[in-house]
């Protein structure tokens, strides 16, 4: 089978310990990273160069993008930027499935699936809070709303692409770190702390800015996202928080025909801005955590719902001397008899035949 059933633990476990089952191997997270990186580089290259191959996608903004200047008010540039990050989603999931050999559903939540209803609830909570915070702030800062001719296209691209861009970053920099260190470090609290401390600076530094207040802002953002994944047992709340933040900001910029929110090496901030951002992020995080508690979102893995293995997997494990009593009903009768679990079935005298070997005893 594509994933190993016992990558998932055989006892109740929080989200960051979902890859800490008996079948875990130290090298699998590293292999997953290599596979994901190769897939990401291939897909992002295709996305970035696609406008060169399609004349209809040529634009002055895209030509500037090639030289390093970013004008996100150009729809082609905006789409390339979002898609070049969004392709992390298939890259990470391929790495998880083939490298970590973990069930993709358990990479999303402790229930082994992406919980769409809970995801929608999180969006319904986060978007209004960010809107009520950012729109008045923009007005106080003197933002001029002067929509350009590409307003409708930019709004559609924001609505469609930004959630995938945000989900890509959450799956990569939060979920990936939590599962990796969760499989390496046995203690649940130690693994959570190490994953948090490792993911926050990586996420912050990869945005390019070295301003201390920008880095502090991104670090707080990362800490809130990690907390939500741990507290809600999945990625949905963190994705909704990230996407809602970006969607509201980019919508405001679409109406003002600017792209000042993109972080670069020149981006700077102030202690006051950092304080305001921290208050907003804390409010959204608290609201989502409160909603998770009230709706009783599942935050602990139920081992009884772990997928059962197929015959080929059990045969391979048995050839290595590994027998799993919890899946006793899936073994052939002769295997159970050989291990003394059931009495052997008497058979009429007949010429001896070689004992089945390898995967064939499950055919």
Image (cartoon, rainbow, N blue to C red):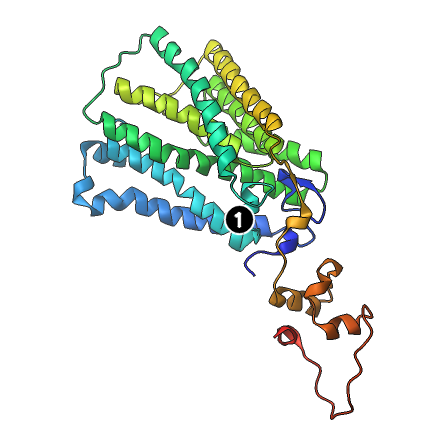
Q: Is disc 1 surrounded by few (<14), some (14 to 19) or many (20+) residues within 10 Å?
A: many
Is residue 204 rendered to the left or right of residue 147? right
**x%, y% of residue 326?**
73, 58
- At 54% from the left edge and 47% from the top edge, which residue is drawn? 105
Mark yes or no: residue 193 visible: yes
SS at mark 1? helix
* Quadrant occupied by the C terminus: bottom right
Which image quadrant: the N terminus?
A: bottom right
* Front residue of 37 and 305: 305
Q: How many marks?
A: 1
Q: Is 98 placed left or right of 46 in the picture? A: right
Most extreme residue toward the bottom is 351
Q: Position of residue 145 (x, y in %)?
A: 26, 14
* Residue 67 visible, this angle: no
Residue 108, compared with residue 309, is above or below; it is above
What residue is rendered at 65% in x and 31% in y?
Answer: 193
Q: Is residue 181 above or below residue 307?
A: above
Residue at x 39% of width, y 47% of height: 41
**Residue 338 in which image quadrant:** bottom right
In the image: residue 270, left or right of residue 59: right
Residue 17, horizontal then vertical, whole percent: 65, 41
Q: Is residue 281 above or below residue 169?
A: above
* Residue 69 percent location from the top left of the image: 27, 29
Is 242 located above or below residue 252 in the figure? Answer: below
Q: Residue furthest left?
A: 55
């Amino acid at each position: 089978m594509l994933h190993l059933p016992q990558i998932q633990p055989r006892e109740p476990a929080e989200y960051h310990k979902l890859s800490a089952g008996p079948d875990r191997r130290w090298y699998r997270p590293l292999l997953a990273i290599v596979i994901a990186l190769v897939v990401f580089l291939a897909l992002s290259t295709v996305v970035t160069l696609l406008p060169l191959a399609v004349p209809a996608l040529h634009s002055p903004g895209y030509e500037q993008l090639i030289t390093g200047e970013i004008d996100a008010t150009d729809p082609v540039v905006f789409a390339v930027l979002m898609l070049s990050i969004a392709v992390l989603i298939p890259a990470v999931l391929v790495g998880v499935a083939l490298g970590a050999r973990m069930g993709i559903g358990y990479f999303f939540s402790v229930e082994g699936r992406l919980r769409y209803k809970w995801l929608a609830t999180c969006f319904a909570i986060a978007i209004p809070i960010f809107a009520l915070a950012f729109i008045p702030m923009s007005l106080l800062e003197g933002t001029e709303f002067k929509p350009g001719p590409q307003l409708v296209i930019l709004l559609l691209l924001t609505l469609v692409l930004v959630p995938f861009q945000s989900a890509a970053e959450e799956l990569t920099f939060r979920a990936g770190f939590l599962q990796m260190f969760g499989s390496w470090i046995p203690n649940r609290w130690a693994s959570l702390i190490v994953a948090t401390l490792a993911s926050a600076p990586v996420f912050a530094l990869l945005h390019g800015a070295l301003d201390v207040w920008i880095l502090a802002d991104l670090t707080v953002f990362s800490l809130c996202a990690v907390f939500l994944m741990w507290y809600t047992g999945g990625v949905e709340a963190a994705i909704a928080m990230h996407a809602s933040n970006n969607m509201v900001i980019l919508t405001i910029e679409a109406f003002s025909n600017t792209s000042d929110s993109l972080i670069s090496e020149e981006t700077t901030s102030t202690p006051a801005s950092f304080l305001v951002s921290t208050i907003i992020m804390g409010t959204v995080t608290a609201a989502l955590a409160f909603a998770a508690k009230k709706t009783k979102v599942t935050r602990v893995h139920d081992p009884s719902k772990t997928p059962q293995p197929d015959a080929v997997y059990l045969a391979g494990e048995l050839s290595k001397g590994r027998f799993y009593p919890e899946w006793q009903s899936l073994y052939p009768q002769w295997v159970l008899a050989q291990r003394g679990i059931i009495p052997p079935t008497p058979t009429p005298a007949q010429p001896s035949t070689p004992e089945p070997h390898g995967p064939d005893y499950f055919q």
